[in-house]
């Protein structure tokens, strides 16, 4: 590494296109990298810049930096910049928050399932970070020479909701929120979910479903859905806080989707962290990533992916304001206490200290 250590470390975050939504920016870079760097910069501990991997000025950005951070990058441009960083004595950190070595059938990323550039960048990186314990254990099965470090997920809670109010003014007409990148992350229960939503909105025609994310083929069967394509992470969080949502739905394939179970288990409960921060009570599929963080009936409803259970949960959440109020407060406090971005920042700071 460079010997001319600076008083404030300069970090370059490399932006990239989404793996599952061509032409759209990566949400992982925002949630996992730039949000933490924003926090560290606000604390006066780093100075950082962000630039796209295909920007003609990217090399100049690398020369400016002490450390280059990549997040699931898998391109010749990213590899070239990582090699250039190494030649200039710039530290390289590679972050992984998903199982990038294969994609399930439901994913739009399956068509581009070639992790060759990722593997090359990982091999030359000075440090590899992962988002959860499952990835920490599993990555050794494909790259046994790598010793990754856990960099926990976190939310800068007070940036979005500094004065929480459990008596949220719910919107009129009532609104539900649904967020999803990629295609619907269900196989066995997908038709069941769509039918449950159709039944609920027939019974409650005054309700509106706000969707944030990537288009999916089945969306045309949901005429009550208001579609918003993915927007910048910070804008999305402010929209959640300001939306007056009664509740959120978060479907994800569980054990019943055996072919995708391992992939889904490597994912992260960012939707719970987002909704908890924004004080939006949620209904979540009883999948591994939500089993590990949600207290059923306290910080959210955790349900099996079956038609009857989804119908019951939708009716329960819509009909019980006291339940919604309890979950708003409990989930917010859980995220603020156990998933605050300061923990992510400390973990990244320790890595930075060892690289400089």
Image (spheres, rainbow, N blue to C red):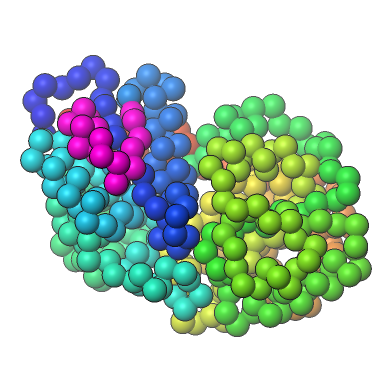
Provide the residue span drawn in magenta. 48-68
Q: Residue at x 59, y 63 (%)?
A: 215
Q: Is 87 left, or right, of 319 in this rendering?
A: left
Q: Is residue 91 above or below residue 250?
A: above
Position in image of residue 225 (x %, y %): 75, 61
Q: Is 99 left, or right, of 320 in this rendering?
A: left
Q: Is residue 149 above or below residue 38?
A: below
Q: Is 91 left, or right, of 180 in this rendering?
A: left
Q: Is 46 left, or right, of 245 in this rendering?
A: left
Magenta-span inclusion, residue 122: no
Q: Residue at x 35, y 64 (%)?
A: 100
Position in image of residue 22 (x %, y %): 44, 59
User: Which image quadrant is residue 287 in?
Assistant: bottom right
Q: Is residue 300 visible?
A: no
Magenta-span inclusion, residue 65: yes
Q: Residue at x 34, y 30 (%)?
A: 49
* Image quadrant where one finds the C terminus: top left
274, 106: nearer the viewer: 106
Position in image of residue 352 (x %, y %): 25, 34
């Amino acid at each position: 590494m460079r010997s001319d250590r600076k008083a404030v470390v300069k970090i370059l975050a490399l932006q990239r296109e989404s793996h599952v939504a061509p032409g759209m920016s990566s949400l992982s870079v925002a949630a996992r990298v730039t949000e933490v760097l924003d926090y560290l910069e606000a604390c006066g501990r780093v100075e950082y810049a962000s630039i796209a991997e295909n920007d003609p000025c990217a090399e100049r950005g690398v020369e400016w930096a002490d450390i280059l951070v990549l997040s699931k990058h898998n391109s010749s441009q990213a590899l070239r910049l990582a090699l250039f960083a190494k030649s200039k004595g710039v530290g390289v950190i590679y972050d992984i928050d998903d199982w990038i070595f294969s994609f399930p059938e439901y994913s739009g990323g399956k068509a581009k399932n070639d992790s060759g550039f990722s593997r090359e960048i990982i091999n030359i990186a000075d440090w590899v970070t992962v988002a959860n314990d499952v990835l920490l254990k599993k990555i050794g099965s494909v790259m046994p020479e790598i010793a990754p470090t856990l960099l926990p997920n976190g939310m800068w809670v007070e940036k979005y909701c500094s004065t929480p109010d459990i008596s949220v003014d719910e919107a009129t007409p009532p609104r539900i929120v649904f967020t999803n990148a990629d295609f619907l992350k269900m196989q066995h229960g997908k038709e069941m979910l769509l039918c449950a939503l159709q039944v609920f909105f027939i019974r409650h025609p005054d309700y509106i479903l706000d969707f944030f994310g990537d288009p999916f083929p089945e969306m045309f069967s949901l005429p009550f859905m208001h579609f918003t394509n993915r927007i910048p992470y910070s804008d999305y969080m402010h929209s959640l806080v300001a939306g007056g949502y009664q509740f959120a739905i978060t479907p994800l394939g569980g054990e019943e989707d055996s072919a995708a179970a391992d992939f889904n288990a490597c994912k992260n409960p960012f939707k719970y962290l987002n909704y908890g921060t924004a004080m939006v009570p949620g209904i979540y599929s009883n999948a591994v990533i939500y089993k590990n963080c949600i207290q059923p009936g306290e910080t959210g409803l955790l349900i099996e992916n079956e038609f009857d259970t989804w119908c019951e949960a939708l009716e329960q959440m819509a009909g019980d304001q006291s339940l919604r109020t309890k979950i708003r407060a409990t989930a917010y406090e859980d995220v603020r206490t156990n998933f605050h971005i300061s923990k992510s920042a400390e973990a990244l700071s320790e890595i930075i200290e060892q690289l400089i």
